Every structure is written in C-alpha cells, then in structure tokens.
Amino acid sequence: MRIALMVLRMFFRAIIFTIMIGWYGKHDKYSEEQRYNLIRKATLQANHAGRITIVAYGTENIPQKSGFIMFPNHQGLYDVLGLIESCSIPFSIVMKKEAGNVILLKQVVNCLKGQLIDRNDIRQGLSVINKMTEEVQNGRNYVIFAEGTRTRNKNELLEFKGGSFKAAMNAKCPIVPVALVDSYKPFDENTIQPVTVQVHYLSPILFEEYAGKKSIEIAKMVRERISDVIVKYENVN
C-alpha cells in the first residue's frame, strides 16, 4: 500500500526519475557524486510521498575519507532508501542477484555501479569480493548486508556471515556498523500510516582493531554492536 501511495503522490516525477536514473546508469560521463545525488533526491521525495520519516544518529561516525564499507542489518527492501537519505557521502552496494529482477531497484543498483552476487556460485562470489576490494582501495564506499538475506521477524537479527567481511579485511578499510530499526515497517506492513525509521551509524572499526581476527570473529563483533543498539530500543519501547 505504501509503495502505491508513493507512486500515486509523485506519479509524473516517478516516471522522470526512473528515466533519469536509467540514463545516468548507462552513461559513464556522470560522476559518482552526480549519480548518487540524483538517487538521493529521488529518495527524499519518495520518502516524503510515502509518509516515511528517517531519524539518523551518529552521522558524525561516517568516515569523511572515502574507502570504507558499511555493514547494516537487513530488514527488507526499504533498507537502502533509509541509508541513502541519511548518508550524504556516495556509496555503492552489493545485493543478491535476485534484486536484478526487481524493476527500479535494478536501475538503482546499475546507477550506483553496484554489484549483484550469486550466493550459489562461489567463483562469482569471489569475483565480486575481489572487485569490491579493489574499488574500496581506490576510494569507493560500499554497503553490504552481512546477514545475506532479510530477517522475517521485525527487529531481530540473523547471524552475520563471515565471508561478507572478506573485502574489508583485504582492503584493510574501516568497517562501519549500521543499526537499522523499524526499517521493515514501510514496505512489509500493509499500511499507509506515518512511520519512522531509525538509522544508527556506529563508531568505525579501524583495521588496527580487527587485524588478526578471523572473518567470523569480525562478523560476531559487528553483530553484537548492532544488537546492543536494537536491544536498547526494544527495552525503551
């Protein structure tokens, strides 16, 4: 219902944004900042049309120097929109290959020069990790969902997969844990009532802090930090 509301309230603008995002994604003449700013502008208007409020905490924890990876928990298709509105620094994204079949999401991933990963193809997955490592070393930023798939139980977390952290380990880059709270509500609840999504950017974990740790140990550490934020929210509410 909320997606329908978004479309109805910004019908003509949605058509224009879809065309522009597709065009920007097909032409390399646009800078990463230009592509990201276009998608962010569309996201801000879509959130307003959908009666969604984003409350961001800890934006000062987002590294000002590019070449980092953010690891949020994964609650649903809406997650990326919450990150885009609250993060002014351009980033790209790694998503499962099935996202390439979702209209508009496919164009967004392409415009962000993101990557689709096949969880059933180890060789292709390694190729994505290697490319991601190289790009992060060259100053690009990424978002990857370490759970591998979205949770089906509101604010509860799934286990974080160690393999998701290989690119960060190889690039020796800052890891930014991100706690998404109530991000499942916009698209997974059949209502158009106003909704608030919280995005908590936690302190970066620098390479010196995780050097020498195994990927599963890093995954556990990041998960625990995100879980602490969500547990505090649940206890208050």
Image (cartoon, rainbow, N blue to C red):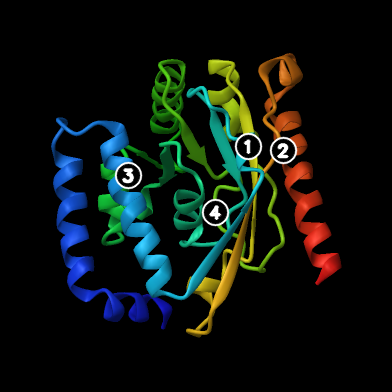
Q: Give the left or right position of residue 92, taking residue 31 as reference.
A: right
Quarter-of-image position of residue 214:
top right
Q: CA distance from mark 2 to mark 1?
A: 18 Å
Q: Residue at x 81, y 58 (%)?
A: 231
Q: Residue at x 49, y 23 (%)?
A: 67
Dot 3 amino acid type: Asn
**Which residue, given by chain and number where applicable, does mark 2 sit on?**
222
Dot 1 amino acid type: Glu
Q: CA distance from mark 2 to mark 3?
A: 29 Å
Classify 193 as above or below 114: below
Earlier sequence position, callout 1 versus callout 3: 3
Earlier sequence position, callout 2 versus callout 1: 1
Q: How many tags in the picture?
A: 4
User: 52 and 3: which one is in front?
Assistant: 52
Q: Residues within 10 Å of mark 2 (few under 14, many from 20)?
A: many
**Which residue, given by chain and number where applicable, does mark 1 sit on?**
60
Q: Verify CB contact (< 8 Å) between mark 3 and mark 4.
A: no
Earlier sequence position, callout 2 versus callout 3: 3
> In this rendering, does residue 161 appear at all?
no
Q: Residues within 10 Å of mark 3 (few under 14, many from 20)?
A: some
Q: Secondary structure at mark 3?
A: helix
Dot in front, 2 or 3:
3
Quarter-of-image position of residue 28:
top left
Dot in front, 3 or 4:
3
Q: CA distance from mark 1 to mark 4?
A: 28 Å
Q: For the N terminus, give its image quadrant.
A: bottom left
Residue 149: which disc? Answer: 4
> In this rendering, does residue 97 appear at all?
yes
**Which residue, given by chain and number where applicable, does mark 3 sit on?**
37
